[in-house]
Every structure is written in structure tokens, then in C-alpha cells.
Amino acid sequence: MLPHQLELLSPARDADIGIEAVNHGADAVYIGGPGFGARAHAANPLGAIERLVRHAHRYHARVFVTLNTILRDDELEPARRLIHELYDIGVDALIVQDMGLLELDLPPIQLHASTQCDIRTPQKARFLQDVGFSQVVLARELTLEQIAAVDAALGPRDAPGRAVLEFFIHGALCVAYSGQCYISHAHTGRSANRGDCSQACRLPYEVRDAQGRILAHDKHVLSMKDNNQSANLRALIDAGVRSFKIEGRYKDMGYVKNITAHYRRLLDQILEERPDLAPSSSGRCTYTFTPDPDQNFNREFTDYFVNGRRIDIGAFDSPKNPGRPIGWVVRTAADHVEIETDDPAIELANGDGLCYLDLQHNLMGLQTNRVERLGSGTEGGARWRIHPKDAMASLKDLRPGTVVNRNRSMAWVRALERPSAERRIPLWVQLRAQGDALCLTLTDADGCTGSATLSGPFDLARDAAAHESRLAEGLGRLGDTVFEAVALDVALPAPWFVPASRLNALRRDAVAALMAAREAARVRPLRAPAVQPPVPYPDDVLTYLGNVYNHKARDFYARHGVRVIEAAYESHEEPGDVSLMITKHCVRYSLSLCPKQAKGVTGVQGTIRAEPLVLVHGQERLTLRFDCKPCEMHVVGRLKRHVVRDAERQSREVPLRFYRTRPAPTAP
């Protein structure tokens, strides 16, 4: 039985970042195309994507393009044409949300079901596999047991047509089930399902109970810490995950380099231990730095629900990066502050980003303009004078004893601005005589071979030992290729003299032949056939939560047995109070007000009930309702009048066609 392949899947805001993701160990990269991706400001032209594809394919790495928004009817034909163009430039797969795309005349490109498809149940995952999806991105909220249940529902792992389970292992967390958040559209008209989320979850809120009492003030109670599954990779593999996804199509080059390298090292350790597993692309990486997730922007880390519900998953104090503690304030002056570090190895630099908590526990920035090392500290560290970028008077509550964190190291930033990784494919080099000619054969770690010959006859070298050394050096000169010679075998009947220019040409020809062999051996993933006759959808009713925004999507679900198909929230057929967000995160639980937490506690049991709470931010009010059986929270609100008016005005200016079940409403 062939080993199961593991895939490290990295994000790319643009092609240059994608190329560096591959260089730092990604087996696959996902990137936004010219349109219809779920990150409105991370679009890329076809030419740039083609450049990324060519680079990735050298290592048999793959490129996925995100086309994971819900589409209007008038957008389907442009999307169809784009998909054909992406297929023509060699893109390996599409990540999609809208089922209407499956009703179009598409090329045989592989389809992956986006996390926006809200894949939480074995039944949903099995349905998506049966309609032709080759990879499904599971909801971030699943536990190991739930992932294993999905894995079991998809059938034997080696079965033909078996879908790959993909899971997010790092990066920012949306508090809502993906695809089930409508707050942004309800309040601003910017739809998260169309790639333009306004991130209401990162705002501060006041939490009030049914009696109007304030339970939390100015807290980011819908803001999650960042995902980090570094400690859970082996358990995720055992549960069935084969594609390990890093979040971050808005993230910068340094983030992608560092986090890709971090997980490449962790997965390579597992691959060394497990002969039943293999990487899904070629090459070994070396780095000029030691990967460290703490160096990049993060809101502190959580492994979320993988090991069950935890109380400390929220970044309630601030959605900003708190950084790492490095020391404390020892003195303040009119134009500078002096701090002492707790480790003499800590070096500060001009431009470092520092921060601290004020007395109200708000995170305050302390951007350095100029730093000076004053000498040794009193407790083993070093003492530093910092001239901040902002006026000292603006740095609220900065006083002696205040703990100082660093959330950006300029030394780290500069290190990752330089070339920081090499990825090489191991190569075995063999030079043999073939009559009076030379034959050079290159064999790579994937078993691909390339050969070239050089006609003779050849004169004898005057200094046989020196020439043999030059011969080995010339054959191993592979610096401008993706290869690295790990073994060299030269067997000649005599010390033939080969001029360097002819030897270089021989090597280049053999490398070209090997690259052609690698391309011939690369298997392009194709779209999986759908099960026939069409399998039924797990439910026969779809509410607005089904995100049906075009008639082709409606036809898809009808063909799969759904009887009642409501329109997407973006169609504005839900003007009253509805669930604008559904989340596994529970504010009651995080505030220790969950009835389940009180169970068995004398004097408390029975006094705490899952009554609604209210979130207040300025003029905005949202109601929190708690569904305790599945242990979920619903954030309830309604569509703003100005959103309806703006949509009506836009429709008058540019005719839009999308799925409705009744006439369009008019704003009061």
C-alpha cells in the first residue's frame, strides 16, 4: 500500500509570496484570482498566477485558486470564463463555496469545498464528496472525535474518489462558523460571503444581561485568539487530516516564510517517524533562521476546540498583537523611558514595536524611534534608554514597574526580508563511458531520470587526480537549478580530459532532460466524477443560511432533493431579527455564567440560566441567544435600512440578477 501523502498548504497574497511559500516548504499554495475570491483585496492577475504555477510545479507542488464567494446570476458567466483561463495556465484546483458553479460547463479542474461551505457534519462532508469535491475544508470548531467521525463517513482512505480532509492549523480565527456570519452585510452592506467582511467581531462591546446589568465593559468578546495546532499535528493525522492549512491571504511575506518553515519542520519530523506517510511534493528545505511563530503578529494562541471546549480562547482585551514580555520600566523622563530587560541576550533596535497595558488593561503601543544600551541591569538583564516615536505625554499610565512587551523586532523583520531558504531535490549523478562518448544520467528522489551524451573521443588528462576533482566539481555545480547532488559516481576507462565548457553543456542538457521527465511524471489532479444518480442533500429545507444567491445554485439543490430553498441573506428577504452569526464560542461560558459550569456547585446550581444577553457598541445592539443542546451561540440582529436603500440604488444604476423567492422589499 502506498504511503498517505501529507500536504502543507500555505497562503499567498500575491505570486511573490506564493513562490517564497514554496521555497520554504509548502506542498501547495492557495491564492486569489482576478475576482470572486473571499478576500476582496487579495486579487491577482492571471500572468502572476501562471508564474507561481510554473515555480511550484518544478517541485511537484500545487497551486489552488480561491473562487469561494457566493455569486449573482450575472456573475456566473464571467466566473465560468475565468475558471477556463485558470485551467489553461495550469492551476491545479479551485476552492469554491457556491454550488451554482457545479451546474456550469467547467473544465475538468479539481474542486475543493471551501471552509465557507460550513462543513461540520459527516453527512455534509459525504455529500460534498459524492457530488465531486476532492478536498473538503473542515470547520475550525471541530474536535478530534468529530474529525474522526467525518473521516469514517468518507469511506476507506485509499478508496478511489475519496476526498482529502483539510484543516486549518494556524492563523486568525473567525468566531462564527465560516459562511454563517452576516453581521457585516446587515450593518454595512459588505458581505463576508462575498469577500468583504467589515470584522465586527473585532470591535469592543458592552455585555448586558436581561435586567440591564453590565457584565463586561469595552471588551472584545467576539474576538478570538489565533489558531496554533503545533502540538496537535500527530493527533490530527490519526483523526484523518491530510492537508494542513495555514490561514493568511492578507499576511505579509515574513509571516508566510516563518509559519510555513515552522510547520514544514514539524511535519518533516513526523514523516521521519512514520514510513506510512509521505510528503506530497519534492525537495528538502534549509533555512537561514530558526522559525518562531511568536515573532509574527498574533493575538496569543489557542488550539480552539480540537481538544474540547476551553475557557481561554478569546482575545477579549484587545484584537492587537500583545507580543512577548521583555522587561519593565525603571524610569520615565520628558522625552524618553528607560527599561530593564530580563534577559541580557535581548537586543533592542531602532524601529522595534513595544507595548504595555494601561491601568484599564488596554494595550498601548510604544513605537521606538531610537534606542541606546546603557549597560547592565540590576537583575541580570540590560538597561536601555528608549526615545519613543510619539510624545511621552501621550503614553498613558507608563510608569516604573510597568511590564513592557515587544510585538515587532526589526532584526527579525530584516532577517526575513533577505533570502532565507533554499529548497533542493536530492539528486544522484552517474557519469559513464559509452564507447568513446560520455553519458551523464541524473536520478532524483522521485525516481525521475534525465540523460545526456557528449561525443568523443577525449584526450587524456595530464594530471589525472586534479582533473577528477574538477570533473566532480563541475558535475555537482547545480546552484541555479532545483537540485542538490547527494551522490556522484564516475566510472571512466581512463582519465579522459573534458573541457569545462563541454562538461557544463552536458550537465545542462541532462538537467533539462530531467526537468522534462519530472513534468511528464507530474500528475495533474482532475475533477472527481459525481455519484449517479444524484445523492440527496442531508436536509430537505434550506434557509437563508444555505447562501443560495443564484438560480444555478437553486437548481443544484433542487436536483439533490431539497424541497424548500430560501434565498441568501444578501437577497434581503430577511428584514427582521435573525441569527446574524452562529458560533461555537459562547460568551456566557467565557464569563463563567454557563448553567453547565454551575452544575453541582452548591448555592449556584439552578440560579444561572442561559437567558439572552445584549451586546452594545455605540448605537449598535445585538442579542445573544444560547442553544445549549448543541452548545452554540446565536448573535441576533436585523438588516439596516440604509443597506437596503443602497442596494436598491445600485440595482437601478447597474441591473443585478440574483435568486429571490419573492419580490424585492423596499426600504421604509
Image (cartoon, rainbow, N blue to C red):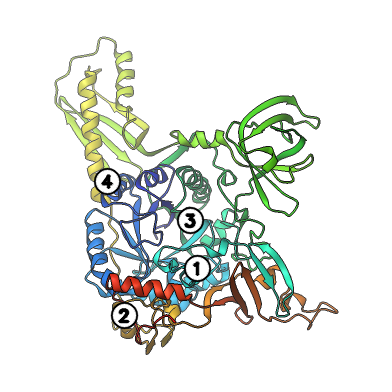
Q: Is residue 290 above or below residue 500?
A: below
> Which comes before the other along the chain, label 3 or label 2?
3
Q: Nearer the viewer, residue 213 or 402?
A: 213
Q: CA distance from mark 2 to mark 1?
A: 22 Å
Q: Which residue is mark 3?
A: 247
Q: Which residue is mark 1?
A: 139
Residue 129: tell me if it is visible: no
Q: What numbered label is drawn on residue 556? A: 2
Q: Residues within 10 Å of mark 4 (few under 14, many from 20)?
A: many
Residue 493 place in picture, x, y as percent: 23, 22
Report the amino acid beneath label 4: Arg
Q: Residues within 10 Å of mark 3 (few under 14, many from 20)?
A: many
Q: CA distance from mark 1 to mark 4?
A: 35 Å
Q: Nearer the viewer, residue 61 or 555?
A: 555
Report the amino acid beneath label 2: Phe
Q: Which residue is mark 4?
A: 518
Report the amino acid beneath label 3: Glu
> Which comes before the other along the chain, label 1 or label 4?
1
Q: CA distance from mark 3 to mark 1?
A: 13 Å
> Which comes before the other along the chain, label 2 or label 1?
1
Task: Identify the residue at image location x=64%, y=58%.
Answer: 315
